[in-house]
Amino acid sequence: PPHSGAKNLPDFFIVGAAKSATTSLHSYLQQHPGVFLPRQKELYFFSFNGGKPAFKLADGTIREPVGCNAAEYFRHYEKCPSGSLAGDTTSWYLYYCDEVIANIKKMYGPDTEKIKIIMVLRNPIDRAWSHYSMHKGQGLIGSPFKEAVQGQLAQQVKDPSNQIFPGYDYIG
């Protein structure tokens, strides 16, 4: 496995669209004695190259920063038992795939080819509705579904310069 010494690195990544069962898969794999997954999922480390961006919510308020820096990331893997396969479950790695692949290549070098990626997908219509319904239930969005997927917020999310939380992208 590519992880070793002080810089334990994952052997595999679980990626997928929100509301596609990445949390369930993470939970199931944590129960396997030969697999190590940090308790926390969604570390975002490879999405933002160790940065911690803060995004705006639909109402314009700033969402807490997401992600972790390198020292924090490596601490998540310090207790990985020797011989275990280590994983990172961050669904957003699918959303930011170009950045993630580039950052993984920088970190792993020639060992990049050894990495396994588990991708969790779901019927896109069911997934979009579930994702929207979760946000609606949490009070994070008040728009009707059609507005949420076609309206002003949907257009703002597509332009990264607006710094709107990408989690509002129910279709992309």
Image (cartoon, rainbow, N blue to C red):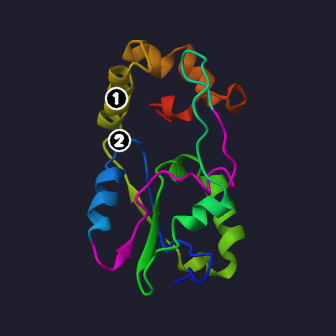
- Tell me the number on the disc at residue 134: 1
Indicate left or right for 129 with 157 as reference.
left
Q: Is residue 128 above or below residue 82?
A: above
- Camera-nearest residue between 16 and 73: 73
Contact (Cβ within 8 Å) of mark 1 with mark 2: yes
Q: Is residue 17 above or below residue 128?
A: below
The answer to which quarter of the image holds residue 104 is bottom right
Residue range (magenta): 32-54
Residue 165, x across and y down, in percent: 57, 31
Q: Which residue is mark 2?
A: 19
The answer to which quarter of the image holds residue 111 is bottom right
Q: Is residue 10 above or below residue 39?
A: below
Q: Tell me the kind of residue under disc 1.
A: Met
Indicate left or right for 53 with 76 as reference.
right
Q: Tell me the kind of residue under disc 2.
A: Lys
Q: Is residue 94 above or below residue 107?
A: above
Residue lying farthest to the bottom in this orientation: 83
Q: Secondary structure at mark 1?
A: helix
Residue 147, x across and y down, in percent: 45, 14
Our reading of the magenta stretch's main secondary structure is: loop
